[in-house]
Amino acid sequence: MPSRRWIAAALVVLALGAAGCAGTPTADDRPVEPPAKVESISGKDVKRVTLTERAHQRVGVETVEIATGASGLVVPYAAVIYSADGGTWVFVETGSRSYAREKVVVENVGGDKGTEAYLSAGPPVGTKVVRTGVVELYGAELGVGK
């Protein structure tokens, strides 16, 4: 039968080992920076979404400038997003890796295989709108996944 000293020593070693594990943070225990910062915009019902550099790279956000065509403003149709109430929007670049939704009025969809949206109202020509990553930005703005 083991002596009481051995049993006590074993318990001390186990307790110290468990305490040591609890006090050492692992990579999984460290706080993780959220991929997007979402903040209110004064006087607007939409929010600004600012992506971390890593999130921006992973999403692959691409922008294009609003152009002018024979029938008004032109954006890639992929840039247009529809809200639950049927509103039509685009995300405009507001700063480095920052974007906000802006209301647009889609007059028609056309171009090669329906790839262009012709707008009768929206941000001015030259404004940068998101062409790739629109759905991810919208999800971040709405808090999907939180």
Image (spheres, rainbow, N blue to C red):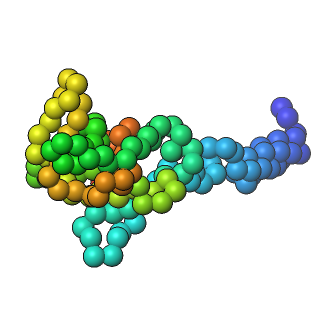
Q: Residue at x 42, y 60 (%)?
A: 94
Left or right: 23 in relation to 49: right
Query: Where residue 106 sits in the image (x, y, percent)?
Result: 14, 46
Query: For the point 17% across and 56% down, which residue is it?
Result: 121
- Residue 87 position in % (x across, y down): 14, 52
**Would residue 115 appear left or right of 10 to someone viewing this image?**
left
In the rendered image, the residue lying farthest to the top is: 113
How many marks are shown on the rendered structure?
A: 0
Q: Does residue 80 sit above or below 23 in this rendering?
A: above
Q: Nearer the viewer, residue 13 or 91?
A: 91
> Quick check: can you spot residue 52?
yes
Question: Extreme bottom residue here?
Answer: 43
Residue occupying image coordinates x 18% and y 48%: 72
Q: Position of residue 146 (x, y in %)?
A: 37, 51
* Quadrant of the frame with the N terminus: top right
Q: Is residue 144 visible?
A: no
**In front of the other: 88 or 74:** 74
In the rendered image, the residue lying farthest to the front is 70
Task: Find residue 98 and report its horizontal and vertical position in percent.
Answer: 45, 57
Instruction: Give the image quarter of residue 13.
Output: top right
The residue lying at 24 percent from left, 30 percent from top is 115
